[in-house]
């Protein structure tokens, strides 16, 4: 085996020397990656929420909203970024817009499912207590829909972290830029390090969101055990209904 | 607008369609690779999923396979495989990457379909004296059909998208038109290539929706599932479970909430989007 100084010249897959000498470059790429992902998911959430409300309001609106987001989802990301390039020029906006459009599919569906799962009795009770539409939405329905919303957010975030790499076609791919340059120069350590960091980012983001959900919905912890029983019950009810 | 006009001009130029770098050759590469990899992925994933589902074992594996798959960037896998010793073996890096990313949606959906098959019906069939293989072929698979098809569609769209990305790692396919366009700053070519890829993906998706309806073994007998599937391809599970939950009146919110919180109810929604 070569020493750690030689792993750069030997082009090893794992190379501590690479991480030490290019630490700044790795850090910059990681920060860009986190930035693009965070901005995309946040904008996605801000756009998805009203869309889900519109889709819930009427069945006539639900069809086009869900249909359009599904069609957008089918377009491969390389094509999506390529189509957005003439609109925004070569910039980070191309990547962010593409990722926002993708995240919409998951977020709209999950928010909608969460809101629709709020029991009618709860809504009635809140209305009876004098809650107006806005207060009903933000203080009753949204907290109850939160588990479904966060579940969607986790899926959207993890897949956005992975898809950000493809932004390297326009030079804004975060760690994807390192993968692209490593591909060109056949630099194995650069590609492997960037790939591993990318997977780690996805797992960390997923874990953080899971923690956030626990914090925001303390009541689900107490109900978890009861939930398992209820789920079995639901299955039985469903079987009976069919 | 300018870009669209440029793309139109590119697409209507006959020379761009002919030859080794032409559209026809790239399209045939794309379809050939996608088709072969999809068949391979089905041969690997479906027997495993149906068997595990029939036995009722390995649920954690079937669900986690797609959770892990989602966190791994397709692009990274393509480049890693290309730089590995396999890289000198022609199309192998692309084929392996395509199969790797097509297996999770197939496996997870088929497994969930088998597990979601109404246990009462399965028990009744067993009580009627059906053997294991009869049960599998005549009861469980027809009941699991909607989710098996959802998985197949997810996998197909995934494969078509990943085959596009293969261009970034030096492979063939329609993606090459886009990357070549980026390479020589030819926006018209970039947009034209992107349009071709997008149209191909949508056509494939549409063809699968039609095939799904035509081959359903329980055509016309599936009301609730149909409604969910008609409106959307990937959301079938989330929607149908919500629908039946509310329809049952007693709708235990905690149940659907907990299921969603664990990401189980929503796995199918997003098993796919990696590329």
Image (tube, coloured by chain):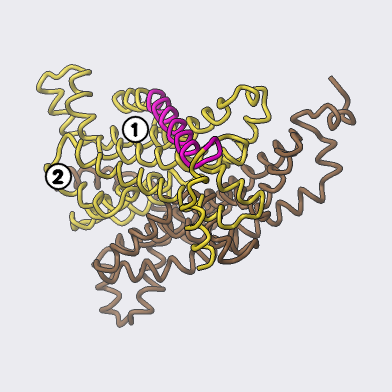
Q: Marks 1/2: CA distance?
A: 23 Å
Residue B232 versus residue B37: which sits nearer the camera? B37
Q: Which mark is residue A240?
A: 2
Q: In the shown orientation, is residue B55 left or right of residue A193? A: left
Label 2 element class: helix
Residue at screen point 25% across, 40% down: B212
- Residue at x 31%, y 23% (from the top left corner): B55
Give whichever of B218, B88 is nearer the camera.
B88
Q: Is residue B43 magenta?
A: yes
The answer to whether residue B111 is above or below residue A67 is above
Colour for chain B in the figure: yellow
Name the residue that disc number 1 marks.
B111
The residue stretch that appears in magenta: B19-45
Q: Chain of mark 2?
A: A
Residue B106 placement (x, y as % from top left): 38, 34
* Magenta residue check for A196: no
């Amino acid at each position: 085996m070569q020493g750690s100084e030689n792993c750069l010249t030997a082009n090893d897959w794992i190379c501590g020397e690479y991480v030490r000498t290019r630490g700044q470059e790795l850090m910059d790429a990681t920060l860009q990656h986190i930035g693009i992902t965070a901005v995309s998911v946040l904008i996605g959430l801000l756009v998805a929420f009203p869309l889900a409300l519109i889709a819930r309001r009427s069945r006539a609106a639900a069809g086009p909203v869900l249909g359009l987001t599904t069609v957008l989802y089918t377009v491969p990301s390389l094509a999506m970024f390529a189509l957005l390039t003439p609109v925004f020029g070569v910039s980070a906006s191309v990547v962010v817009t593409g990722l926002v459009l993708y995240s919409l599919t998951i977020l709209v569906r999950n928010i909608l499912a969460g809101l629709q799962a709020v029991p009618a009795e709860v809504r009635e009770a809140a209305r009876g207590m004098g809650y107006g539409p806005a207060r009903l939405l933000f203080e009753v329905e949204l907290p109850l829909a939160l588990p479904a919303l966060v579940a969607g957010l986790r899926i959207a975030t993890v897949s956005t972290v992975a898809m950000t790499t493809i932004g390297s076609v326009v030079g804004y791919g975060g760690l994807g830029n390192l993968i692209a340059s490593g591909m060109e120069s056949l630099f194995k350590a650069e590609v492997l390090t960037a790939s591993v960091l990318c997977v780690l980012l996805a797992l960390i983001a997923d874990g953080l969101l899971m923690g956030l959900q626990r914090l925001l919905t303390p009541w689900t912890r107490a109900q978890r055990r009861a939930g398992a029983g209820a789920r079995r019950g639901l299955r039985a009810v469903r079987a009976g209904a069919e | 607008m300018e870009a669209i006009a440029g793309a139109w001009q590119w697409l209507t130029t006959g020379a761009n369609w002919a030859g080794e770098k032409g559209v026809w050759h790239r399209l045939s590469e794309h379809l050939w690779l996608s088709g072969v990899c999809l068949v391979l992925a089905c041969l690997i994933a479906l027997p495993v999923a149906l068997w595990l589902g029939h036995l009722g074992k390995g649920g954690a594996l079937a669900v986690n396979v797609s959770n892990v798959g989602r966190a791994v960037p397709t692009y990274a896998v393509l480049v890693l495989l290309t730089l590995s010793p396999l890289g000198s073996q022609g199309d192998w890096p692309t084929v392996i990457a395509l199969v790797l990313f097509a297996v999770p949606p197939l496996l997870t959906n088929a497994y969930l379909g088998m597990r979601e098959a109404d246990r009462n019906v399965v028990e009744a069939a067993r009580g009627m004296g059906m053997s294991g293989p009869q049960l599998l072929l005549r009861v469980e698979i027809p009941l699991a059909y909607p989710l098996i098809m959802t998985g197949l569609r997810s996998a197909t769209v995934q494969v078509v998208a990943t085959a596009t990305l293969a261009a970034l790692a030096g492979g063939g396919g329609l993606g090459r038109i886009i990357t070549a366009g980026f390479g020589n700053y030819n926006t018209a070519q970039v947009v034209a290539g992107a349009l071709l890829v997008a149209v191909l993906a949508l056509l494939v998706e549409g063809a699968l929706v039609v095939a799904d309806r035509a081959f359903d073994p329980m055509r016309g007998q599936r009301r609730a599932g149909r409604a969910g599937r008609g409106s959307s391809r990937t959301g079938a599970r989330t929607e149908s479970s919500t629908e039946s939950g509310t329809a049952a009146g007693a709708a235990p919110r905690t149940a659907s909430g907990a299921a969603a919180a664990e990401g189980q109810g929503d796995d199918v929604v997003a098993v796919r989007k990696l590329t």
